[in-house]
Amino acid sequence: MRSSYGRALLSCGVACLCIRVSRSQLTLDRTYCDKVQFGSDLQWECRDAKTLTYGQNNTYAWEVTQEAAQDQAYDMMLTVTTSSGDAAVGIFPPGTSTAPILASASGTGKDVIFFPRSQLTAGTFFVVVAGGAYSTSYKMSFDTLQDPRKSRPHESAALGQLLLDCCAGSACQMLTSQYAELQDNDPTTNPDYCSIVPNVCQEEGHLTQLGLSGMGLSCPFPAAQLTALTYLEALDLSSNSLTGNISLVAAASQSLQSLMSLSLNGNALSGPLPSTCALVQDSMAALDMSVNYISGSIPSCYGQSSTLRKLHLDANDLEGPFPAFSENSIIMSITASNQELNGTVPDLTNLVNLTIFNLEGNEMTGLLPGLPAALWTLDLSGNQMTGELPDAYGNLPQIRTLDLSGNGFSGSFPASEIPACSASQSLAVMSLSPHLSSGSKSLLVGLQTSNGWTI
């Protein structure tokens, strides 16, 4: 049945440089692209793949009629699939807000946002797709779901038991106060998890995306309950108080064959990364284990994954060498700052998709590595590296943040062709060792400097 409520004002036109991404945060300027009106049924696909570079965007307008808002006529599913690179997507509400109400930057090649009918309000929503890699090609689809999706009974029971185990006492107050079903201490009495943002269910009601970030979960990692969610593609349990050995996480991830994104940053997990590399199994694309108590070294097989796009291991207790990545790797973001990694930084030249590399605050030694042309952010500050800067460091066309402070480098910054002529292209932050001097005055126009390095 075709809906009489949905009216899409969308554009596959040129990119509008009015939205910028800063540390994964989308911000909105109310200027948007030319609008194209489609039919009464809001089911539409951008058939021609759009291409964006890092920080560029396309903006789309989606209009909800007064009638649709009053009747809560449909849920909306927004899917952005990238064939190359990476994209972040956000939905901005009608009015003057400059922050998205829903956003996704999964790093997996597929971002899905479920927008429930309960949040429909009349007016024009804005959908922003922003490039998160040197070059990103994507397709986007909008679907209206007139029939609500209902979570499967066995998956609801597993989640009910998870919340019962992890929400004792005053834990999870924000979640339990919002859903009366969770106040009965009965794992068989549950809300519909398919309707809770940011969860996503497929048509049959299987959860494919589960988000319980910052919900106050306090318990050992709930591996047994999570393995019941066999269709899960993205799991976000960040910013909670989960404990236990990281091997429990690895065992659960092996059971979840479709899992592509796992975010557990900001918990209290401990132990060494398993040498079996179960956490970077064939489907894993984005792994964030930052701010835990993970110890030991990073297994070399982490650099051999053919699917991993994002690896974030900051602020743990890791030590030993940082592994080299295969030249066939599609990795785009690597961060492992503020721990005790040592040895030399491996050559990065062949990592053609790499845009962010951060090993700040470790014990790395030796010379600077070769870099790929796509690199956007390089932070090797607070290490023990020495030598002169290679000439290639003066010709990094995409570089926006370069921090090499707190090392023992010497000599001059090489003659540079880095663009610094316009606000959209200029280097945002440049921090070098105090032992370095400038070899290129033109590079320094409008830059922030530190460490007593004078222009």
Image (spheres, helix red, strand yellow):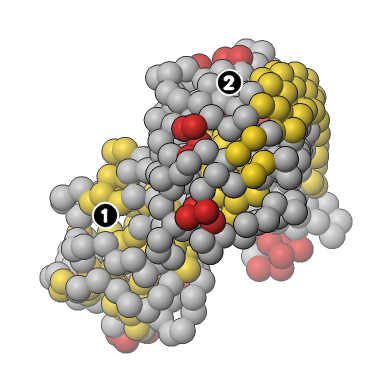
Count neighbours of disc 2 (C-alpha within 10 A) and say few if under 14, some if 14 to 19, many if 20 or more: some
Q: Amino acid at mark 2?
A: Pro
In the rendered image, residue 133, in percent from the top left (x then y), is placed at 40, 44
Looking at the image, residue 418 sits to the left or right of residue 43; the answer is: right
Callout 2 secondary element: loop
Residue at image position (71%, 19%) is 343
In the rendered image, residue 48, in percent from the top left (x then y), is placed at 16, 50
In what quadrant of the picture does the N terminus appear?
bottom left
The foreground one among 222 and 408 is 408
Residue at image position (19%, 74%) is 35
Callout 1 secondary element: strand
In the rendered image, residue 423, in percent from the top left (x then y), is placed at 43, 65
Residue at image position (49%, 32%) is 391
Looking at the image, residue 376 sits to the left or right of residue 216; the answer is: left
Residue 314 seen: no
Looking at the image, residue 299 sits to the left or right of residue 125; the answer is: right
Residue 276 seen: yes
When the figure is inspected, residue 340 is found, relative to residue 268, above or below; the finding is above
Which residue ends up furthest to the left in the rendered image? 39
When the figure is inspected, residue 446 is found, relative to residue 264, above or below; the finding is below
The foreground one among 153 and 72 is 72
What residue is shown with label 1? 141
Q: Amino acid at mark 1?
A: Ser
Residue at image position (68%, 56%) is 454
What residue is shown with label 2? 346
When the figure is inspected, residue 167 is found, relative to residue 59, above or below; the finding is above
The foreground one among 183 and 22 is 22
N-terminal of the pair, mark 2 or mark 1, is 1
Quadrant housing residue 363: top right
